[in-house]
Image: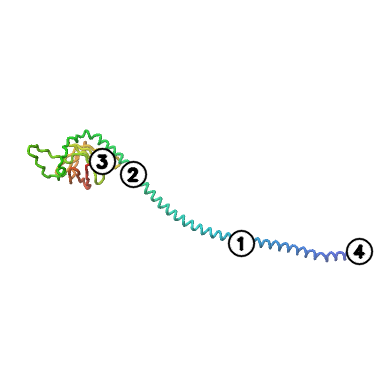
Amino acid sequence: MKHPALLAILASIAACLPGCVVWEIRDEMRRTNAQVGAVQESLASTNQKLSGVDTQLTGTNERLSGTNERLQGTNSSLSGVEEQLALLREINASMGKLDTHLASLRKSIGAINNMMPFLGLDDVPAETDAAPAADAPEGAPAEPPKEGQPAQPRREVLVGVWVSAYPDRSRALIVTPDGKYLLSKPDAKGKTTVVERGAWKRGDKALTLQPDAAPPVLPIELLHATGKTFAVQDGAAVWVFVKP
């Protein structure tokens, strides 16, 4: 009798077991569905946020494109500024060289001014009131002396102080009545000013400036000479000197 009772108990337990497992599976599926729903809502929210981020990125890209265009314009402007700065640096260097040359020229002019009392320029006859006579062309007949007055010696128009007016103003020349001259000019490199001394001699349409302690030089052509200007041709170069 014990065995049938045990079997009945086991049968009742076995009948209850499948129902419990099903209920547990159902509850687990409900929890899983709830979690999946929450995940889907989170994914939908994330998708919305990502869509907003995409929109912001699109606007950012557009702004960056405009910024790149402005940067290109700025680079072009900077290139132009750099070219102007390079030109200004060249101008500054040229101005520095010019300042150096002018400083040397000022020293030479100062030396010339200091030597003026010793050059004997006061011996040159003063120009009379008849100014056109001093500017008369070379070779013009002298005005005959008045009755009772001695004849005046012809004045050499080249005697005096001159500065070059063409092709530049880099030279100063002093011609003295005793046949000496002093010439201030740039050196061979054009960086400093040198003073040349020597003897001068005027010939027929020619002028010779013979430096001291130098081999004989060829005369240069005298193109024009008055009391205010004279012009010479030295090789292919034409120089015009005027009274300062």
Quarter in which the C terminus is drawn: top left
Q: Say which of 162 and 150 sits in front.
A: 150
From the image, which quarter does the N terminus lie in?
bottom right
- Amino acid carrying mark 3 in the image: Lys
Q: Which residue is mark 2?
A: 95
Residue at (80, 65) in percent of width and height:
19
Q: Does label 3 or label 1 sit earlier along the sequence?
A: 1
In primary-sequence order, the first of circles 2 and 3 is: 2
**Disc 3: which residue:** 185
Q: What kind of residue is marked 1?
A: Gln
Q: CA distance from mark 2 to mark 4?
A: 131 Å
Helix, strand or loop at mark 2:
helix
Residue 226: x and y in percent read: 17, 44
Identify the residue under disc 1. 48
Residue shown at 42% from the left, 53% from the top: 77
Label located before the other in sequence (1 or 2): 1
Q: Amino acid at mark 4?
A: Lys
**Is residue 69 placed above or below 113 in the rendered structure?**
below
Residue 199 vertical placement versus 238 (above, below): above
Between 55 and 136, the one lying in front of the other is 136
Query: Given the current orientation, which residue lies at the most extreme left position?
Result: 147
Tell me the element at label 4: helix
Q: CA distance from mark 2 to mark 3?
A: 19 Å
Residue at numbered disc 4: 2
Task: Report x, y in % for residue 165.
Answer: 24, 45
Front residue of 176/215: it is 176
Disc nearest the viewer among 2 and 4 = 2
Q: Sequence-wise, which precedes: disc 3 or disc 4?
A: 4
